[in-house]
Image (cartoon, rainbow, N blue to C red):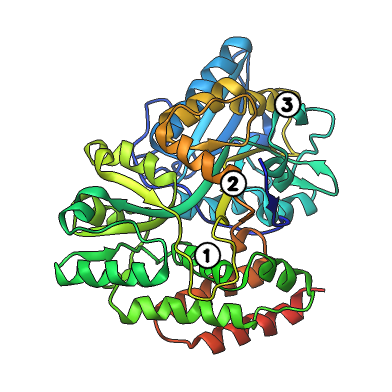
Amino acid sequence: MKKAVTSLTVISMAFLAACGGAPAGTGKTDGGAAPAGDKKPAAEAVKTGDKKTLEFWYIDPGDKEKVYLEAVERFKKKHPDVEVKALQTPNDTYKQKFAVAMSGGNPPDVFHSWGGGWLKEFVNQGNVLDLTGKIDENNYVKTVLDNAKFGGKPYGVPLGLSITAFWYNKDIFNKHGLKPPATWEELLKVVDTLKQNKVIPIALANQPKWPGAYYFMYLADRAAGSDLFKNALGRKGQGFDDDGYVQAGKYIQELVKRDAFNKGFNGIPWDAGQGRQLLYTEQAAMLVMSQSIVNNVRQEAPDYEKKLDFFPFPILPSGKGDPSDLGGASAPVWSVSAKSKNPDLAIELIKELSSTETAQAYSDRTGSLVGVKGVTYKDEFAKRLGALTEKAKDIHWPYDQTLPPDLAELHKDTTQALFGLSMTPEEAAKKMEEKAKQILK
């Protein structure tokens, strides 16, 4: 990969998942959460008969889940004395559930993370196993693996690499004579044309706050360049009150005031799927999302895929950002609890979950990129996104996975307030910088 990548630190909750049914044998209820009192502590690695038990937690439904469970089955064939209890929990509730398990001393042996500061918090507490010398780092794309390294030591192995883009309905665009916009002015014209034809221009489910943050991060990058966030985080001459961030807020509010989004967007949850339904029913034409939307479509509305396409986030007038820059995230990253009673077996499981065989299936069946070497992209979405990634001068990673926890939450809160028109761009930037001065050294 030819790119310079933002240094990676921090908290998260975000990304890649939606509610959905699960195959039998995953040990979960219809809602995706384990029944109260039903779970034995993973750290005990208890024996079921003559078998040792590992607990494995993840967030993704659909084809991603199937790929994970197939990897689990391969692991079990190699280790017939081990039982793996797999539990899927929807994205927006996973973080709290995991934090409770970790603080209660009952974490899963193997768990999903996004790397960055979210993982670092648990590493700092001594709750994540150091994988130094226990994995072959050459099996992974360096820039992606680095997102799970702290103090030069790896604490997780990556499987997925997700790129964020504008996804759109080709049929709707063709019907109204529209082309994918390359500039902000062109995007506004598309928005106006769709509104005139009673189509919601952009679907947004911003109750969890991170979907709206995609816009803020891209707009800041396009307005001021990739160094803005790095400098603000590193306290190097630019802050979170920089004009680039103020401009990002203004562009967001320009879209809101233009009625570019569905009504009530700040109260609509992502996991429930209401935002995606606006796409599937062709009430809305576009969506800014990671390529996890491909997995959602294949699970929830497979016939819609033939209408689905994407284009890069548009460039801004007089913007200083490189148009090749992308927003991305590394997920899932597989880590092992320091409390696991069978760490060697848990390490073998994360190796299987991030093997070339697993990564190839993950890409082929979900249209995703991967952080594992040796994979040939066959899926058309993956091929095209991979080509963009190779050309990217920079990839910005989600702020809520890079900033310290309190600042990350404020970033999401102020961004949601920008979308709700309850805070001016200047006020949001000022709040962020004031908090940054308190937290960042």
At which x and y percent is residue 368? 48, 37
Secondary element at image label 3: loop
Compute the Cα span from label 1 to label 3.
42 Å
What residue is shown with label 1? 218
Which quadrant holds the N terminus?
A: top right
Query: In the drawing, does residue 270 fall left or right of residue 316?
Result: left
At which x and y percent is residue 333? 62, 40
What is the crowding at mark 1: few (fewer than 14 residues within 10 Å), some, or many (at least 20)?
A: many
What is the crowding at mark 2: few (fewer than 14 residues within 10 Å), some, or many (at least 20)?
A: some
Which sits earlier in the primary sequence, circle 3 or circle 2? 3
At which x and y percent is residue 322? 59, 62
Which residue: 67% across, 60% down? 402
Which residue: 71% across, 78% down? 436
Q: Residue 342 carries which label?
A: 3
Q: Is 318 situated above or below 208?
A: below
Which quadrant holds the C terminus?
A: bottom right
Query: In the drawing, does residue 408 fall left or right of residue 255?
Result: right
Q: What amino acid type is highlighted by mark number 3? A: Asn
Q: Could you tell me if residue 328 is visible in this image? A: yes
Q: Which tag is nearer the camera, tag 3 or tag 2?
A: 2
Q: Which of 376 and 366 is in front in this view?
A: 376
Compute the Cα span from label 2 to label 1.
17 Å
Q: Which tag is nearer the camera, tag 2 or tag 1?
A: 2
What is the crowding at mark 3: few (fewer than 14 residues within 10 Å), some, or many (at least 20)?
A: many
Secondary element at image label 1: helix
What residue is shown with label 2? 391
Q: Could you tell me if residue 127 is visible in this image? A: no
